[in-house]
Amino acid sequence: MRKSVKVGNVVIGGGAPVSVQSMTTTKTADVERTISQIKRLERAGCEIIRVAVQDEEDAKAIRRIKEQIEIPLVADIQFDYRLAILSIDNGADKIRINPGNMSRDRLKDVVAAAKGKGIPIRVGANVGSIKRRTSERWKDLAESALEEVRLLEKEGFYDIVVSVKSSDILETIKANEYIAEKIEYPIHLGVTEAGVSETAVVKSSIAIGHLLLKNIGDTIRVSISGDPVREVIVGKKILIALGLREGVEVIACPTCGRAEIDVENMAKMIEENFFHVQKRLKIAVMGCVVNGIGEGKDADLGVAGLRDGAVIFVKGEIKERVSKEFVLERLKHYLNELLEEVER
Ligand code: SF4
């Protein structure tokens, strides 16, 4: 089993549930906007938030931000050791640094500050910043990260989280598999610069999903350009789909000429309404009863379209016919019954 670290009240590694994290897109010193974005992320299920620290203003803002948020905060520092120490002094629950960019004495100071507050440090490598040594870029990536780990170990620091990220999913997979063999520290997974919308979702799901299925990875960040709330939603969905987290999985038929209801919108509406439910349940949205009930029989609860309404079925058995405007209300009723049954 991997070692564990504690980031605020969240444990990473050591068999703890895989946590979902994200990064704010606001200027950190803009405290009001940063807090408001973090609150939206918290509501979406974000468990750890990272903020960029570019200058003293950003580092000092951490204290005020932390007063108003619930989840642990990670300060992301590129190379300035003073900003790392200032972030720690202002209450960061973890810092992300690049020890290779600091002199030994300065790294010693950062390590002393982190030890003093009992917070972990994340190190790692991105493919953009590595030194090329071999003909295999994934290996250079992994070795660069391991070098950073050794720099911290030399200072007697072992509260470490490691990441190796590339925008190429095969490199990300190989590099993570390699470091997982070499070290016991918890691993932060992600595909860097994954891109926009579907491309980012596909790349992240393949790389993160593959690694988690091999039991590699203790915390995840899905990178998607744009609103970070999407990163959290996709991250949670990856964990639910892998069976690593309890939650509602909405399955929907692809629709065809037989569809009698607007499957896409109904599935979206159901997802939005039941996303907060933390129980392992499947809800099926099927366009018609001809094949829908048979195809959706593995679901705990489902709806299938009729010409003049819909039928609701529970574990493959039809419970009632409803008109389309009452579908959500009746699904909620049956979902509550199922939840009571699960809790009994
Ligand atoms: S459930 Fe009905 S509408 Fe959906 S794909 Fe199957 S046959 Fe078509």
Image: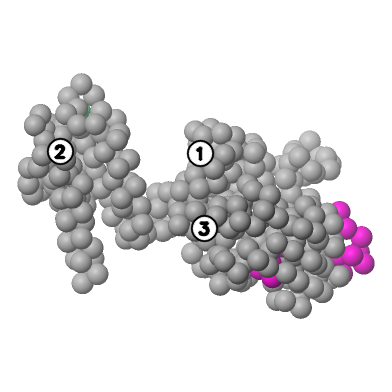
Give the residue pinned by disc 2.
324
Which mark identifies residue 299?
none
Using a 10 Å C-alpha cutoff, classify the residue at mark 2 as few (fewer than 14 neighbours), some (14 to 19) or many (20 or more).
Answer: some
The reply to whether residue 262 is in sight is yes
> Against 193, is 342 above or below?
below
The mark closer to the camera, 3 or 2, is: 3
Task: Based on the picture, tell me whether residue 98 belongs to the magenta stretch.
Answer: yes
Decide if ligand 1 comes within 8 Å of the CB at mark 2.
Answer: no
What kind of residue is marked 2? Lys
Q: CA distance from mark 2 to mark 1?
A: 31 Å
Q: CA distance from mark 3 to mark 2?
A: 34 Å
Q: Give, as a single range, the part of the protein colored magenta.
A: 91-108
Q: Residue at x 54, y 43 (%)?
A: 227
Q: Residue at x 20, y 21 (%)?
A: 257
Residue 225 locus on image (x, y percent): 59, 38
Is the Cβ of the residue at disc 2 closer than 8 Å to that at disc 1? no
Q: Residue at x 8, y 31 (%)?
A: 308
Residue that protrudes farthest toward the top in the picture:
257
Which mark identifies residue 39?
3
What kind of residue is marked 3? Lys
Give the residue pinned by disc 1.
201
Is the Cβ of the residue at disc 1 closer than 8 Å to that at disc 3? no
Marker count (numbered): 3
Image quadrant occupied by the N terminus: bottom right
